[in-house]
Image: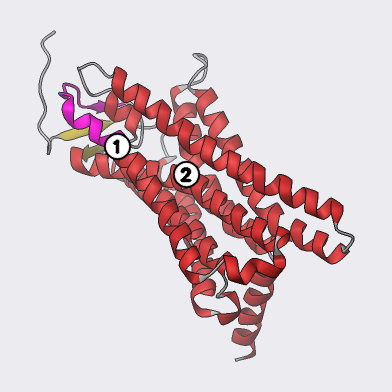
């Protein structure tokens, strides 16, 4: 069969879900409810950090990146999937497909780097409380946030830029959304370099994030054991447990997603759903987890709601 070359602006076909008759609109409205719930929770957290002066602290300035990243992840993926379900079009132009894939990969790397940065802040706050204000200066916080987004951007750009050297001879994305592996399967050249760089980038993200968090939390644990102040221990638990829960949720969902593609007896639709979960579960749970385990955010939100009710 002769290969056909496709232009930059050509249209791609997505592999849709197999939806039973009458199931299209219930699935669509359920997806819309999930999307707006996630958007509302993350926008609430962003708004609180921006408008409430008691949250204008290094910890919350770094935390600000987390709901922002979650908004990128859920918005880049879910609206397009829901639109395809209700309109039954299942097509996307190549540039938009690349943009969606780029944003989704930025989201995945972003959450790892953001959690690492937040663990460093907690390490300084709990292990060096007297030096916290002198260490976590506005300049340092800006550098940390810039490093998080900058490193993420560079790694993802390096991954996607490699695709420009390969000819594209297929037009069917075997998924309901676009990602780098799906785009790579459209090419008809040697993808060995792309695969190596992809694995390298993934390893760097995981190694940097996990090693920084492991160091920070081990140091925090040692400080909790050594200190006799129960208040310090309580503070450590309350500020760190949310970050650990978020990391565990992300890693567990990511592991299940990877495993679902390794077993041949897993249905194609289930693989697609598992692939979507990593862009749905963290954005839905992260603001709730932080609202439950971070007393200052919880208290601030309750105060705002109480003031609104009183009016």
Tell me the crowding category of disc 1: few under 14, some 14 to 19, or many 20 or more residues within 10 angstroms, Cα based.
some
As drawn, is 2 to the left or to the right of 51? left
| Secondary element at tag 1 | helix
Q: Residue at x 20, y 17 (%)?
A: 189
| Secondary element at tag 2 | helix
Residue under label 2, please give it: 279
**Residue 168 in magenta stretch:** yes
Q: Residue at x 87, y 63 (%)?
A: 230
Q: Position of residue 209 (x, y in %)?
A: 54, 42
| Front one among 277 and 185 | 185
Disc 1 versus disc 2: nearer the observer? 1
Please say if 293 is above or below 116: below
Q: Which residues are magenta?
A: 158-173
Please say if 150 is above or below 205: below
Residue under label 1, please give it: 158
Q: Are marks 1 and 2 in contact (CB under 8 Å)?
A: no
Q: Position of residue 243 (x, y in %)?
A: 64, 52
- Whichever of labels 1 and 2 marks the residue nearer the N terminus, that label is 1
Tell me the crowding category of disc 2: few under 14, some 14 to 19, or many 20 or more residues within 10 angstroms, Cα based.
many
Please say if 132 is above or below 145: below
Q: Residue at x 29, y 41 (%)?
A: 157
Q: Position of residue 220 (x, y in %)?
A: 73, 52
Please say if 77 is above or below 169: below
Q: Indicate the quadrant containing the C terminus: top left, top right, bottom left or bottom right.
A: bottom right
- The answer to whether one can see residue 20 in this image is no
Tell me which corner region of the image, top left, top right, bottom left or bottom right, holds residue 13: top left
| Front one among 290 and 222 | 222
- The answer to whether one can see residue 62 in this image is yes
Q: Residue at x 12, y 15 (%)?
A: 3
């Amino acid at each position: 069969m002769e290969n056909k070359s496709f232009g930059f602006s050509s249209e791609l076909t997505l592999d849709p879900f197999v939806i039973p008759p009458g199931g299209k609109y219930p699935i669509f409205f359920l997806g819309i409810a999930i999307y707006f719930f996630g958007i509302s929770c993350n926008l609430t957290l962003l708004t609180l950090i921006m408008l409430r002066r008691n949250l204008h602290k290094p910890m919350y300035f770094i935390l600000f990146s987390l709901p922002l990243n979650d908004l990128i992840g859920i918005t880049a993926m879910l609206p397009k999937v829901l639109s395809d379900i209700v309109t039954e079009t299942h097509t996307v132009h190549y540039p938009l497909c690349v943009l969606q894939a780029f944003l989704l990969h930025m989201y995945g790397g972003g959450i790892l780097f953001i959690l690492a940065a937040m663990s460093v802040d907690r390490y300084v706050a709990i292990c060096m409380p007297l030096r916290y204000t002198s260490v976590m200066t506005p300049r340092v916080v800006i550098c940390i946030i810039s490093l998080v987004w900058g490193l993420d951007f560079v790694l993802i750009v390096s991954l996607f830029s490699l695709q420009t050297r390969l000819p594209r001879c297929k037009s069917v994305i075997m998924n309901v959304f676009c990602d780098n592996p799906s785009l790579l399967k459209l090419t008809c050249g040697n993808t060995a370099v792309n695969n190596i760089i992809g694995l390298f980038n993934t390893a760097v993200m995981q190694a940097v994030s996990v090693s920084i968090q492991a160091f920070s939390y081990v140091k925090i644990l040692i400080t909790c054991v050594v200190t006799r102040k129960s208040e310090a221990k309580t503070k450590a638990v309350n500020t760190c447990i949310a970050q650990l829960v978020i990391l565990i949720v992300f890693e567990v969902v990511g592991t299940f997603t990877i495993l679902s593609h390794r077993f041949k007896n897993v249905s194609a639709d289930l693989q697609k759903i598992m692939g979507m979960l990593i862009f749905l579960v963290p954005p839905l749970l992260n603001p709730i987890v932080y609202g439950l385990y971070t007393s200052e955010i919880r208290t601030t939100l309750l105060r705002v709601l109480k003031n609104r009710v009183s009016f």
